[in-house]
Image: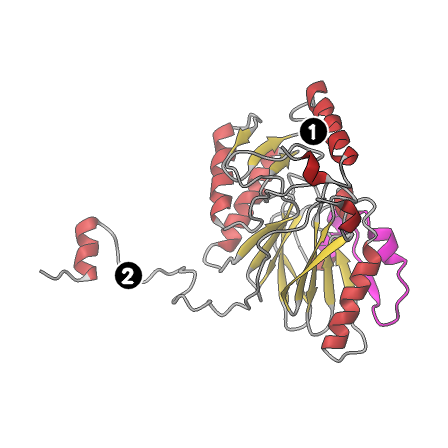
Amino acid sequence: MKISLAVLGMLVGISCAPRAHAQAAQPDGGGIRPGSLPAAWNTGGPKCMEMPEWQVHEYNPDLYILRQSGCTDYEKPFVFLLFGLDRALLLDTGSRRGNIAPQVQLTLHRWLLRNDRAGIPLVVVHTHSHSDHVAGDAELQALNDPSIPITYIAPTVEANQKFYGIAHWPEDPGAVDLGNRIIDVLAIPGHDAAGVALYDRQTAILFTGDSVYPGRLYIRDLAAFEKSNQRMLHFTEGKLVAHILGNHIEQTRTPYLDYPVGTMYQPNEHEWGLSRGVLFEIQAGLEAMHGKPQRIAYRDFSLWPAGPLVKETDESRAAFKHTQKQQLDHMWDQDQAQP
């Protein structure tokens, strides 16, 4: 006996009516501009003599992802370079000893050559104000290249409000138009007071800084962090989300296992890109705390209240020093140091 989908839906209590907020009507890409992420990233080895300071990956011809080598700093942050018709946007400037200006300049000039253009203005912005994401600010501000005039936006609440047109911080959204490429901006304090998430309508990527990534999600203001996560959930409802891309990878491919703080070389890294579903997991974990900070491990990340919420212990400081020493002692031949 054949049963129609509508009848089957009534029998099991599921409506088969079209969903008002369906992510995409058909599995045809949803009209977003596609791109690719690498299967694996270089980290901090195995041999630092062979490692460039930055790995550059072309997601598509107008979005480039730069990752700082762990051989320069164990934080290994990601930096993003997006191009519109009128200007380019650099999201973050890397960590200590990154020497980012030459790499950004080279990438920009290659894009100009590829597109037969003489120049393009560059806006330098940040996901938040922590040192491992702003360390390259000074050298980029000092870059004297007539083909790349730079506008610098300080990583502060006031500067973000003004540049993105956020009327009421942190509740209201903002945006910036790069020229036929609109980037929506959400205030997401909690990890850092000046934190923002950027949603690129063209690629449907949500850039979440240090608030969402495969690793330890350091929470410095629990109430603000929970509201910020809710803000991202509400904003993305009904929207396409191709990837959630944060600024680090600290998790391994083994569920619930992360790399210790201070690790340079991470040959078994977790997949970088996350789905919107992780926002629901984070929200459930935050609500389960009932306002009392605690560290909770999940398969792909950990909620990690830090700073004034949970005091750092002598044991954790000792573990960091031990990890850093082991990694630095073997930075020229890390594969020999792996178990």
Can you identify the residue that label 2 sits on? 17
Instruction: Give the image quarter of residue 105.
Output: bottom right
Which of the image's four quarters has the N terminus? bottom left
- Magenta segment includes 140: yes
Q: What is the x, y in percent for residue 151? A: 81, 62
Specify the segment rendered in magenta: 135-162
How crowded pointer 1 is (Cα within 10 Å; few <14, some 14-19, many 20+) is rated as few
One can see residue 283 in this view: yes
Camera-nearest residue between 21 and 296: 296
Kind of residue sitting beneath label 1: Gly
Residue at the (57%, 28%) spot, across then down: 295
Mark 1 or mark 2: which is in front? 1
Q: What is the x, y in percent for residue 252? A: 57, 39
Label 1 SS: loop
Can you identify the residue that label 1 sits on? 307
Residue at the (61%, 36%) spot, across then down: 216
Q: Is residue 286 above or below residue 78?
A: above
Residue at the (52%, 34%) spot, across then down: 256
According to the image, what is the colour scheme of the structure? secondary structure
Label 2 SS: loop
Q: What is the x, y in percent for residue 163? A: 73, 58
Q: What is the x, y in percent for residue 230? A: 52, 44
- Asked if disc 1 and disc 2 are in contact, CB closer than 8 Å, the reply is no
Residue at the (47%, 47%) spot, across then down: 277
Instruction: Give the image quarter of residue 6.
Output: bottom left
